[in-house]
Image: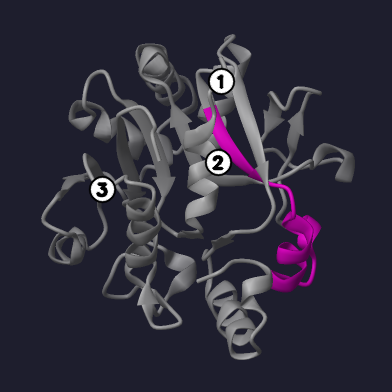
Amino acid sequence: MIHPPTHTVILAAGQGTRLRPHTDNQPKCMVPLCGVPLLERLLASLSACGLTQPLTLVGGYRVDVLQQAAPSAVSVIINGAYDTTNMVASLACAKPAVTPGNDLLMCYSDIVVESRVLQALLAYQGDAPVVMTSLSTWQPLWAARMANPLADVETFVMDADQKVLSLGQVPNGLGEVQGQFMGVVRIKAAALPAVWQQVATVLATQGPNAYMTDLLQALIDNGLPVQAIPVAGGWLEVDSCEDLQCYENLAAQGVLGNYCQL
């Protein structure tokens, strides 16, 4: 695949409290799904797209485990305030490491994502400075994961051109849920100065616990278009012990591939 030079940043600083006891002694991304750590699965998908370096992990909780597990070509930087901050703060920690002139691909570390999803993101050649995938088939996955899917789902509203208008809030109804954020965002090199400025503003105004959806909404509100690329399946979020057990059960039944191919 031919795509612009890209610096990948994986955010892996959190404590993963909802995955305890699996995270008692290791970061969330080291928890295995069907015998393979989440980080290993993510790195394999990135590698399949040619995204092997530069690649930076932002660690925090049990960063020593992360440092031992990371391939030698992967740099690890530390969010020392991992226990009092969230995703935007971890992204800010990566700023000094991001290669100038490269696009930035930001990934959560608690996801399983098929390489085709990343390829859809990299293949985008439109004008939008910020691009992200959106899970269009979220309803079957949420229904498999939890008894009341609407208790967890967030708003995701697009216009006719699939530009994102709003996201990350509690929806008033299904009309405000046209997809779900997947924790994968591509920022074009020319837009990075404006994005870094907005990162600083969001942390200053909303505090260190700002979510990534808060940053994306701030970019939209300040005139930086965010393009959604809807994809069907190819993604899992491993946020809790219930998620992990659900996926293991689906795999044992031979139907996990209906949601995402491991």
Look at label 1 and name its amino acid. Answer: Ala
Residue 149 visible within the image: yes
How far, Cα to Cα, is label 2 from label 3?
17 Å
* Residue where numbered disc 2 is placed: 120
The numbered mark, 1 or 2, whose residue comes first in the sequence reads 2
* Residue where numbered disc 3 is placed: 52
Instruction: Residue at 44%, 39% (x, y): give it.
Output: 209
Instruction: Residue at 62%, 26% (x, y): give it.
Output: 227
Q: Which residues are magenta?
A: 131-151
Q: Is residue 21 above or below residue 122?
A: below
Quick one: 50 or 21, which is closer to the camera?
50
205 relative position to 51: left or right: right
Residue 246, quarter of picture? bottom right
Q: Is residue 106 above or below residue 165?
A: below
Q: Residue furthest top?
A: 223
Look at label 2 and name its amino acid. Answer: Ala
